[in-house]
């Protein structure tokens, strides 16, 4: 059962997609995010712990990110952590996308990405960037379906960009 006061320090907005699907946007609590990424570390294409210190990453996310948590039947099904603090360049950045395995195939990641794009427009940002492994075919396909374009590629890692038009 989702409890906003356990998950978020600040709730900015709720988006009702359907009776069963709601996206909550806000600033996550460090404890929630830390427990989440540690629990699902091996779910990622490349485990987070193999490339970053999870405690430091969690602290950064909870202090700087805008996080989009998707609920399916009032249970946390996944999230996107993003940064929208670069006021000079007016760009956002998606740093993490995750949907729990039992909720995959329901289109939830698509709803999450579309919510980030709407947030980008509503808050006057020009674009959103992300990095994805080209071999991560489902993620790569999702981002291209949502209008992201590859702007560079290095050793199988694609820098992608979606522009607010």
Image (spheres, helix red, strand yellow):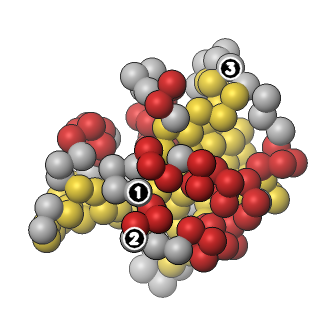
Residue furthest right as drawn: 5
Disc 3 to disc 1, C-alpha distance:
28 Å
Image-based side of 89 in relation to 84, left or right:
left
Image-based side of 16 in relation to 156, left or right:
right
Question: In the rendered image, is residue 116 in sight?
Answer: no
Q: Residue at x 23, y 56 (%)?
A: 133
Foreground residue among 140 and 32: 32
Dot 1 lies on which element?
loop
Against 82, residue 79 (above or below) is: above
Q: Earlier in the sequence, mark 3 or mark 2?
A: 2
Residues tagged 2 and 1 counted as in contact (Cβ below 8 A): yes
Foreground residue among 14 and 29: 29
Check residue 92 in the rendering and tell me which mark sits there, or answer none. Answer: none
Q: Residue at x 45, y 61 (%)?
A: 48
Kindly report which numbered mark, 3 or 2, lies closer to the viewer in this rendering.
2
Kindly report which numbered mark, 3 or 1, lies closer to the viewer in this rendering.
1
Check residue 73 in the rendering and tell me which mark sits there, or answer none. Answer: 3
In the picture of the structure, the residue carrying the numbered disc 1 is 47
Disc 2 to disc 1, C-alpha distance:
7 Å
Disc 1 crowd, CA 10 A, few/some/many (<14, 14-19, 20+)? some
Disc 2 crowd, CA 10 A, few/some/many (<14, 14-19, 20+)? few
Dot 3 lies on which element?
loop
Question: In the rendered image, is residue 70 in sight?
Answer: yes
Foreground residue among 143 and 156: 156
In the picture of the structure, the residue carrying the numbered disc 2 is 51
Q: Give the position of the N terminus as an image quadrant.
A: top right
Q: Residue at x 76, y 60 (%)?
A: 31
Q: Position of residue 41 (x, y in %)?
A: 50, 53
Q: Earlier in the sequence, mark 3 or mark 1?
A: 1
């Amino acid at each position: 059962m989702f409890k906003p006061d356990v998950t978020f320090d600040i709730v900015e907005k709720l988006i009702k997609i359907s009776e069963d699907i709601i996206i909550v946007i806000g600033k996550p609590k460090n404890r929630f995010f830390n427990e989440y990424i540690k629990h699902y570390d091996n779910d990622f294409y490349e485990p987070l712990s193999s490339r970053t210190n999870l405690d430091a990453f969690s602290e950064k996310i909870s202090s700087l990110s805008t996080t989009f948590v998707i609920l399916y039947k009032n249970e946390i099904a996944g999230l996107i952590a993003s940064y929208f603090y670069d006021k000079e360049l007016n760009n956002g950045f998606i740093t993490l996308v995750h949907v729990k395995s039992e909720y995959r195939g329901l289109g939830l990641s698509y709803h999450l990405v579309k919510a980030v794009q709407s947030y980008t427009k509503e808050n006057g940002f020009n674009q959103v960037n992300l990095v994805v492994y080209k071999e991560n075919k489902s993620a790569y396909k999702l981002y291209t379906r949502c209008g992201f374009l590859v702007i560079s590629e290095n050793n199988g890692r694609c820098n992608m960009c979606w522009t607010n038009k």
